[in-house]
Image (cartoon, rainbow, N blue to C red):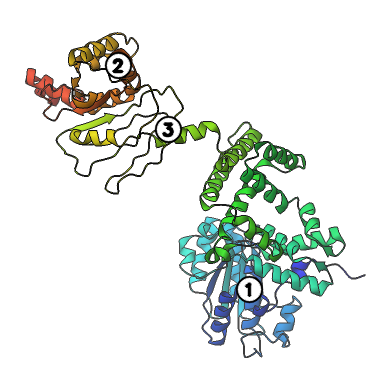
Amino acid sequence: MDNYIVSARKYRPSTFRDVVGQKALTTTLKNAIQSQKLAHAYLFCGPRGVGKTSCARIFAKTINCMNPKADGEACNECESCRAFNEQRSLNIHELDAASNNSVDDIRSLIDQVRIPPAIGKYKVFIIDEVHMLSSAAFNAFLKTLEEPPHHAIFILATTEKHKVLPTILSRCQTYDFARITVADTVEHLEYVAQREGIQAEPEALNVIAQKADGGMRDALSIFDQVASYTNGNITYQAVIENLNILDYEYYFQLTETILAGNIRAALLLLNEILNKGFDGQNVITGLASHFRDLLVCKDEATLVLFEVGASIRERYRDMAKRCPDAFLYKAIELANTCDLNYRASRNKRLLVELTLIQLCQLTHPTEEVKKKAQIETINPVQQPANAAPAATTVTTHIPAQPTQHIAPPQISAPQTQKRTSRPPIGTSLKNIANPKTQNQATNAQPAITRTDLRTPFSEQELTESWTNYANAIDKKVYLKNIMLNNMPKLQDNFYFDVTVHNPGMQEELINNAIPILENLRQRLKNNHIQMRVRISETNEKHLAYTSSEKYEHLLNINPVLAKLTKEFDLRTD
């Protein structure tokens, strides 16, 4: 009985033509050999299993071939090629830097460099995982790498290029190996399956290729594993069972429940998936990838990014037509946020369930979300195009509490004015505007059904109500002092102005505008009272608020303070 050889070794490339997924790179190497323009040192870098060491061996065999072919490939018939194929060639030396990374190992390699080849033109030294060499070994290798004998060629291979010393990189021609695409991997697996007499479904090979993540060695290893599990009949169902991969069907079912807004069905489906042993993070990352695939298959321009089997492609297209772009954007964002927070979460299952609930609400929002959207639609504030810069004015529009149901009206804002979004919790807005144009904002508010109170009041009544409310405040001392030191001035259309001295005061009044206006409306029996908060431009009553202002104020009182500050090197900020 013949010894079994795994596919990764049995189908290892022996010519440049056999290398999968690196056509541009192999063409460059063949052209360099044909034109006799060989560098003394090469650096092959890239992910695992993409052909770095295989290309190094093929390169070593080809440059020593006595009868190379016209296309730049080795003949595989001369003594040099036969010695190489039978692994008895003295012209190739391999060093695993992961386990031979000391100075003595490099010195032993340098001693071999001095000996010319017995057969052929070149001796090739392949150092695998070169980034594992110690700093001392790198330094011992530098001189030889820069000026080797004419018969010596070095090929360094690494998966972590950033760990190689810059002095080494500068002495090498660098070749970056790319990850092998899913299509190329599937094509090669079909070739191996045909040679081995194995039946394999294209969809099953596609799953294997995606699981390999661009590495052909991993793909062939998985292929052997599944072939052994299925006795030579590789099916899609057998692959997902053997590799513990979540089926596409679950993602389609989850998407159906999300589009229907069926939260309970989504949670039950998640429970079924978790009971089968799948991790919650795998579920959520797979769902994010599923939404991403739905997004890219909506447009022919992005269809090249869609890497699934042909049998399932049409199903993705049909479902993508039912998913709006905005929904997919938000769904991907929610799933990605859940993935980022998964490790830090103490209740991981609840985090995934909460994400599914949020996804279901994207298409079927709750009544609370609908009411919030209605509130944001009511009372839009419009900015005048020619706002006067005389003073900073902030107007707060606080709608009266309706006594009947409010229907969200259809509002079409003029093209010359921009509509601003409202804060999440209510109706307080900051708007830099000319006070003369505030009536326009009031007129733009749609009529709603409410108890309409327009009881006239005087400025004295307004001041009394303002003062009574301020005196009733106990916990907010800062707000109380602001209100008592800055009295309101009544304007037209039930507006009143409050002039303050700095932005801090302005912000404090705006943050408390809702309870202030509700109290004033109740006291004065008028639902149309609005407040404008200004920052005084002249600021005649200038107060010292910052450390620098306080220092200047003290300096004006006692100029000797400047000498004291200088002598003791004191800070004034």
Q: Do the residues under discs 3 and 2 have CB atoms within 8 angstroms?
A: no
Mark 1 nearby-residue class (10 Å; few <14, some 14–19, many ≥20): many
Dot 1: what SS? helix
Mark nearest the camera among 2 and 1 is: 2
Using the numbered discs, state the Cα–Cα distance from disc 2 to disc 1 in whole angstroms. Answer: 83 Å
* Amino acid type assigned to the residue bearing label 1 in the image: Cys
The residue pinned by badge 2 equals 520
- In the image: residue 496, left or right of residue 226: left
* Amino acid type assigned to the residue bearing label 3 in the image: Ile
The label on residue 55 is 1
- In the image: residue 513, left or right of residue 359: left
Residue 218 vs residue 84, the one in the foreground: 218
Mark 2 nearby-residue class (10 Å; few <14, some 14–19, many ≥20): many
The residue pinned by badge 3 equals 375
| Residue 363 in view of the camera | yes
Mark nearest the camera among 3 and 1 is: 3
Residue 506 vs residue 379, the one in the foreground: 379
* Amino acid type assigned to the residue bearing label 2 in the image: Leu
Q: Is residue 353 above or below residue 324?
A: above
Identify the residue at horizontal 15%, vertical 23% (top origin).
Answer: 551
Residue 180 vs residue 397, the one in the foreground: 397
Residue 510, horizontal then vertical, whole percent = 30, 26
Q: Is residue 260 above or below residue 430?
A: below
Using the numbered discs, state the Cα–Cα distance from disc 3 to disc 1 in whole angstroms. Answer: 66 Å
Dot 3: what SS? helix
Identify the residue at horizontal 16%, vertical 38% (top origin).
Answer: 389
Residue 124 vs residue 384, the one in the foreground: 384
| Residue 100 in view of the camera | no
